[in-house]
Image (cartoon, rainbow, N blue to C red):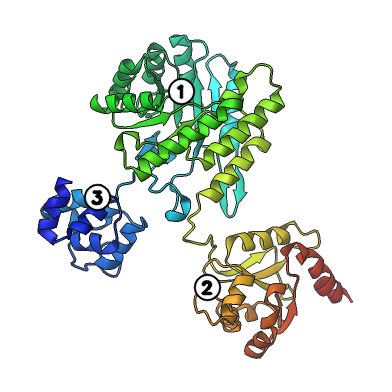
């Protein structure tokens, strides 16, 4: 609170404002009062108030204000940084372009702001795997990719587990892994000698060390400091011990670590979810800096029950992972390599970590599918990502032809039905109007590309038909309400009639 009292004297904050800010309730005016207020635009914003607003919404970095980096603003910068830093510290695993950032969360609930740094997913290998199987799993992790809403969904890390407890064997495996992948690593063993052997090989790659426990924390802290690596802290189902160990490590100058409260399948799943939720609540709602670090889960424990069949183990691992993604896990270690297990998790992660303040959108403009000609159909949709990719997928997978033009109208990421409804309600933002469509046709210069003047519109926009025809002079064909009906519609109302 001392820095808040000093600040009160310098910028005349009321006692009420000081109390509010100390609870983390910051508004743009609070931030604006501390900025240089030169309106220099070096940050890329129109003025300092616009910059302050984006700082509070976490849409821009504090470092973008270059005057604030001067020595005369050193104290002010420190105060702003303390105000704006996330309750959950951001940790980096790995180096270079392939590094993975975890944590960095500001809120407990997604609707309060947004979640940042999607849950990182690691797949394990062991130091007792044959070389061919080791390489197969590494390439499987690297090769996992699925295109979803314009983004490639991928796995993030390799977790190397020492099942042999042999330092030499572990070091040999780490050497093989680092020679065959640039993915960030997690080095897993409770034996400090084993980990040190692996760290000597992976020196400079900043892997995550897993894990410090009640019995080995001193040696693990030494390794983390010596090799400048983040450290996982493991205290299964004991949050008091976890906090005590975290606090002790901080006193020993270990600054970057990840908290593992234990992952328990079956009857223990209730405690697992409760512990993750409690830890995130303590950091985000109570401001406990000792527990303000990323959380990791190990759904791989589903494979420890030997009586489980492979299918049941995979299913158990997957549902545990899905629950942990929704309950604040920043990092997971998995074993299964099957697509049916991993793909739903990556899609869930993608959907959960989109920004609820910003509709998912694609760039507006003219899209061309296939080798078009002057007779190719012309249609339009909005730039809501889900709508666009659904339409594009139907066009590309169509058996009849994929030769067509698609106009993507900028509705700021709103779907057709909602955008038309907003237009009818006389809303200016995110609305879809006949005038916008006419402007898009003109801007795209589509009239120079086709000899016909026919526009296929979504069924949800049928009420705009007459207005579009009046403004553009084009004949409107009302298409299906669902993109799934598009191939059949084109077959019956375009290609078949062309043949007739």
Dots 1 and 2: beta carbons under 8 Å? no
Secondary element at image label 2: loop
Task: Give the CA separation, mark 2 to mark 3.
Answer: 37 Å
Q: Which numbered disc, 2 or 3, marks the residue that appears first in the sequence?
A: 3
Instruction: Between residue 26 and residue 211, name the one nearer to us.
Output: 26
The vertical placement of 113 against 444, above or below, is above
Distance between mark 1 and mark 2 Cα atoms:
49 Å
157 and 96: which one is in front?
A: 157
Crowd around label 2: few <14 · some 14–19 · many ≥20 (10 Å): some
* Disc with the residue nearer the chain's start (1 vs 2): 1
Q: Assign a secondary structure to mark 1.
A: loop
Q: How many marks?
A: 3
Residue that mark 1 sits on: 236
Q: Which residue is mark 2?
A: 430
Residue 100 appears in the picture as rendered: no
Sooner in the amino-acid sequence: mark 1 or mark 3: 3
Mark 1 nearby-residue class (10 Å; few <14, some 14–19, many ≥20): some
- Tell whether 212 sits left or right of 66: right
Residue drawn 67% across the image and 70% down it = 405
Structural distance between the alpha carbons of marks 1 and 3: 33 Å
Q: Is residue 102 visible?
A: yes
Which residue is situated farthest in the bottom direction here? 470
Residue, far right: 500
Quarter of image, res 404:
bottom right
Expressed as whole percent of the image width and height from the top left, the position of residue 28 reads: 28, 62
Which label was assigned to residue 22?
3
């Amino acid at each position: 609170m001392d820095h808040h009292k000093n600040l009160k004297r310098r910028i005349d904050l009321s006692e009420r404002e000081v109390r509010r800010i100390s609870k983390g309730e910051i508004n743009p005016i609070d931030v604006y009062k501390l900025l240089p207020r030169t309106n220099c635009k070096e940050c890329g914003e129109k003025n300092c108030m616009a910059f302050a607003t984006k700082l509070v919404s976490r849409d821009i970095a504090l470092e973008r204000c270059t005057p604030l980096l001067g020595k005369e603003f050193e104290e002010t910068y420190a105060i702003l940084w303390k105000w704006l830093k996330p309750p959950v510290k951001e940790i980096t695993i790995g180096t270079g372009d392939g590094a993975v950032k975890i944590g960095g969360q500001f809120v407990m609930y997604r609707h309060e702001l947004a979640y940042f740094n999607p849950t990182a997913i690691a797949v394990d290998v062991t130091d007792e795997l044959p070389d061919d199987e080791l390489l197969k799993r590494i390439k499987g992790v690297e090769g996992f990719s699925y295109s979803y809403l314009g983004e490639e969904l991928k796995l993030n890390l390799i977790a190397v587990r020492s099942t042999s407890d042999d330092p030499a064997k572990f070091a040999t495996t780490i050497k093989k892994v680092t020679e065959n992948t640039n993915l960030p690593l997690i080095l897993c063993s409770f034996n400090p000698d084993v980990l040190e052997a692996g760290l000597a090989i992976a020196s400079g790659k900043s892997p995550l060390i897993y894990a410090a426990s009640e019995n080995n924390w001193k040696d693990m802290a030494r390794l983390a400091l010596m090799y400048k690596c983040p450290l996982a802290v493991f205290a299964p189902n004991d949050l008091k011990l976890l906090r005590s160990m975290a606090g002790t490590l901080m006193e020993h100058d270990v600054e970057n670590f990840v908290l593992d409260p234990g992952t328990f399948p079956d009857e223990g799943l209730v405690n697992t979810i409760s512990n993750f939720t409690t830890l995130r609540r303590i950091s985000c709602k109570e401001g406990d800096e000792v527990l303000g670090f990323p959380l990791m889960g190990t759904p791989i424990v589903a494979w420890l029950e030997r009586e489980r069949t492979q299918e049941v183990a995979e299913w158990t691992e997957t549902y545990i992972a899905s629950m942990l993604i929704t309950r604040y896990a920043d990092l997971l270690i998995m074993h299964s390599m099957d697509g049916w297990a991993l793909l739903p998790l990556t899609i869930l992660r993608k959907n959960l970590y989109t920004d609820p303040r910003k509709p998912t959108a694609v760039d507006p403009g003219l899209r061309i599918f296939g080798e078009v000609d002057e007779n190719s159909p012309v249609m339009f949709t909005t730039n809501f990502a889900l709508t666009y990719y659904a339409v594009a997928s139907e066009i590309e997978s169509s058996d009849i032809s994929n030769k067509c033009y698609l106009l993507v109208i900028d509705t700021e990421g709103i779907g057709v039905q909602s955008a038309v409804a907003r237009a009818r309600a006389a809303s200016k933002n995110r609305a879809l109007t006949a005038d916008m469509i006419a402007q898009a046709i003109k801007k795209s210069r589509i009239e120079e590309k086709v000899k016909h003047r026919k526009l296929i519109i979504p069924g949800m926009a049928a009420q705009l038909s007459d207005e579009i025809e009046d403004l553009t002079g084009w004949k409107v064909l009302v298409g299906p309400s669902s993109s799934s009906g598009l191939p059949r519609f084109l077959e019956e109302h375009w290609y078949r009639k062309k043949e007739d």
